Image: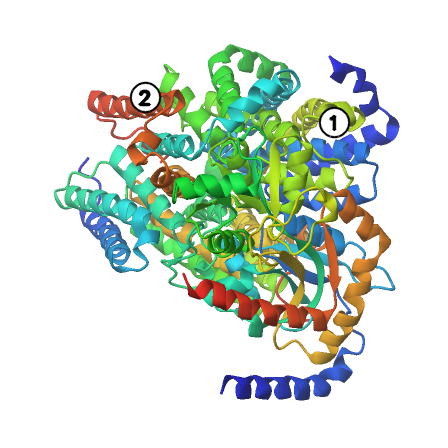
Amino acid sequence: MSDLPRTQHIIASGAIAAIGMTVAYISYTQEPAGAFVFPRLIATVFAVLAIWTFAKAVLGRTKVGQGLSGSDMRNLLPGLIVTLVYAFWAAKELGFYTATTIAFFILLTLYDPAPHNAPKTWIKRVLITAGFMAVMYGLFAMLLNVFTPREIFS
Amino acid sequence: MEFLFYMGDVFTPINFGLLLLGTIGGLILGATPGLSPTMTVALMIPFTFKLEPQQGLILLGAAYTSTVAGGAVSAILLKIPGAPANIATTLDGHTMAQNGQGAKALQLSFIASAIGGLFGVFLLIFLTPVLATWALAFGPSELFWLAILGVTVIGTLDSSSVVKGLLSGCIGLWLATIGFDDIMGAQRFIFHPALGGGINVIPALIGLFAIPQVISMFAKGRANVDAEIITVQRHPIGAAFREIFNRKRALGIGTAVGSIIGLIPGVGGQIAGLVAYDQSKKMSPEADKFGTGHPEGVIAAESANNAMVGPSLVPLLTLSIPGSPTAAVLLGGLLIHGIFPGPALFTQYPQVVWPFINSMLIGQILMCVFGLMIAGWAANVARVPRAVMAAVVLGLAVFGSYSVQNSMGDVYVMASLGLAMHFLERFGFSAAPLVLGLILGPIAEANFMQGAMIANATVGQMTYFFTGWLNWLLIVIVIASISYSVWMELRQRRYTTKEDASA
Amino acid sequence: MKKWIAGAVIALTAMTGTAMAEGHGDYPERPIMMMVSYGAGGATDFQARIVTMTAGNEDALNMPVAILNKSGAGGRVGWNWLATQADADGYTLGAYNVPHFIAQSIEGGVSYSTDSFEPIANWGADPAVFVVGADSEFNSMEDVIAYATANPGGLTFSGAGLFVGHHIAALQLEKAAGVQLAYIPNNAGGAGAMRAVIAGEVLGGVNNLSDAFRAREAGTVKILGVFDVERNSFIDDVPTMMEQGYEIDNASVNYRGVMVPAGTPQPIIDHLAAIVPTMFENGRVASRMEAGGSPMHIMNRDEVLEMWAQRQVTLEALLADL
């Protein structure tokens, strides 16, 4: 099992251990104590297990999890950025339907293996986006009456 | 046999039309991410204002049964569990769909749902008085031990390392404490206003299961699809029936666990699927295959979550106490027509109650028929190109988590948990134990607090939590479950099975 | 100082109100959302859905009202959202439960108070009652208090949570009878508290009259007393606490109604305050509420304002001892 990236595991489990200890610290210091009895119990177990995992990672005894590879990261980075911008900013600021249309189309363009220089593939992507948005609008706006944030173009 | 006498009422043209409407509508809405059975039934209530009581209840009964089964569709095809009940279905069902066995997975899930569901409704018909006592037997101490029992499952559930499984569970338990606590109303771990309401289970489910998968699809880049075209295997329906009856153990465990746990107010529906999955895994000689697209995983989970439908209504119909959120919504559907549930219900309003129960029986069968009809066709979702799939799942995840309570905060929670889960998965943690922790945390805590308060006022905590045969039964099962995990761990030092197989 | 700020706020809203009045001439022009801070299927949710079902009628608001559930922590989650995040544009209404939200704001830790909301109208009043299991040895409040006197702090009884109507009723009972009781808040709300009584996990319970009435019909509980100033027509055989010798007023009665976040334009508030009560008076609404065993009590905006102010004073006094 020497192919597991040890440094990555040390960093990841270290981060979790840090969260575990922060949680434990918060639950032992916050008031009212009565409401934190249960969190204290959980946080203690959480911190102990997290430190154990961290120790195993440092000793190189981690057995599962193949870590992140460079090529994976390069591939997912554009998609990740679109996802972040879409979920945390655009959906609220531009309106759900506008933001989803844009994000959907960008993701298709980014990850669709069809060549970008043929006009036909662009039309196909536009049609897929339009079809998806029609289904979403029919389902959430017309059938379920979900009040989404105001669209920027309305 | 009174229910047979009223069977005819279900088949009048209007009633049967409503039954069809409820079943099909329920399947569609149940498959929509973010719409739990409770919300679906709540959405249908306004339609029943205008209907006769009998008709309204037929619509609601059919909708309830089929939304529970509908949740399996998105769980299998998109890896978005529609409700906590469908979490366990994703574990094997989605892997099957990715291997091109989507048709088979859907067929198995619908048949198993129908069999479990019919069994559950028959329990409701024949054993209601007995079951009512059972539903009342679970007080704070019993529910506390039951939640602890659930926690012991965490380490072995869909995880290749017991320690990391337990750690995932702890993260889930901790996430559950975020927000106002339910009894004291104190604020805990609210780092951002979006967390003020705590972490809602449905958006968390969507994020934890769907988003890591979207990101994994991104990670494969613009690779050429030709290399890995999935051939969607056709699967004859007859073969699906044979398969189910050859896997009686999973079906039996699923149905039994679902019916028993479904009865317990407030807990049942959410964990029945996961507990049944875990139990059939532990009792199966092929335990290693679970998590790699094993049919028994789907059968156990789906028979369990539909088996709970019938029993979950027992406390409502006999004692007038809604035992689950969905039952609470159905109570509204009865009250609106001036019908008070209770022991007198069956004598005062037989023309409403029996068609309602019958509609759940017929609904199960109709749901199964429709399900089998669309299964072969729906399985083609697995052939949708990866880029389209990633974008569709992301869009559905955002809309679905928002629509639960029209809250942007839920979208942020969904996206953050999903992103974090992707990286955690790369380091050997898994989503199922985390979700189980998230669900069990509040149950364990609230019942412990209540139990402790009652105990302090009466007999003392030791006596309260350690008296009574049901408490001891649960404690014994807890000890057995822990011993089993430890024994498995020592015997096998289970390294990697699942991760390597799917990587 | 506080009054001065409040005056300034009123003046400001009045000014912006007139300025915007023109723009709101055709209010409402799209469907309206009403936030209910309890889960689907709860008593508040159920009643909110009934009383708003005629909103789409031409003589009412002419637009449907959609119910949005934001449940959690005894209503705190939903009311926090309404006070801090909801748009004050008249398209976001909220359901209130008095004394719950007032008691919670006095307790602290939430971002709302009576100043954060503008009442529109009240639709229901659901008094708290004291229930015991059908086979309980208690047959009157006197038996209950006798037991509590013999076992100080040993009489366990359930209710829907802390700082909600049931809790207020419990505090009043402790004070009026001069005994120490063990109030057990339930995390599953009124339904969970009722279950605890029926299953015999606790010796008694405080619960909603509407739910207790239904449970009594089902033969699972006895109702021993009403926490209100007069008997209720649904259960007119049950005496009030006052009749049984305990000085308890109607401070715990659960008033349910409609409100909007503060800052909503005055013309819209006026429009809603004029229309909404007539919506509640609709015959179809009344018959559905009656059928469901939910007591109605319609009050207009001015009456509700007065009721809120009264409760604020009573509850501050009651909770000061905690």
Please state if C320 lies on the left or on the right of B299 as rendered. Answer: left
Quarter of the figure with the C terminus of chain B: top left
Q: Nearer the viewer, residue C154 or B188?
A: C154
Q: Is residue B243 left or right of residue C16?
A: left
Residue lying farthest to the front in this orientation:
C245
Q: Which residue is drawn at 29% across and 45% down?
A: A42
User: Please, what secondary structure does the residue beneath circle 1 have?
Assistant: helix
Indicate the position of residue C39 as horizontal and vertical percent values.
58, 49
Q: Mark 2 lies on which chain?
A: B
Depth check: give the residue in front, B328 or C164.
C164
- The mark found on residue B476 in the picture is 2
Residue C144 on image: x %, y %: 50, 40
Which disc is residue B245 wearing? none
Crowding at mark 1 (Cα within 10 Å: few <14, some 14-19, many 20+): many
Instruction: Label 2, secondary structure: give it.
Output: helix
- Toward which corner of the image does residue C182 lie, by quadrant? top left
Report x, y in % for residue B85. Answer: 52, 34
Q: Give the CA separation, mark 2 to mark 1.
A: 39 Å
Say which quadrant the N terminus of chain B sits in.
Answer: top right
Q: Can residue A115 be seen in this view?
A: no
Q: In the visual, does A7 lie left or right of C263?
A: left
Q: Note whether B1 is above or below B287 in the view shown.
A: above
The residue marked by circle 1 belongs to what chain? B
Residue drawn at the location 70% of the way across and 79% of the way down? C266
Q: Is residue B322 at least partly visible in the picture?
A: yes
Q: Which mark is residue B353?
A: 1
What's under tag 2, amino acid-wise?
Val
Residue name at image x 54 percent, y 85 percent = C3
Query: Splitting the image into 4 quarters, where does residue C215 fall?
Result: top right
Marks 2 and 1: same chain?
yes
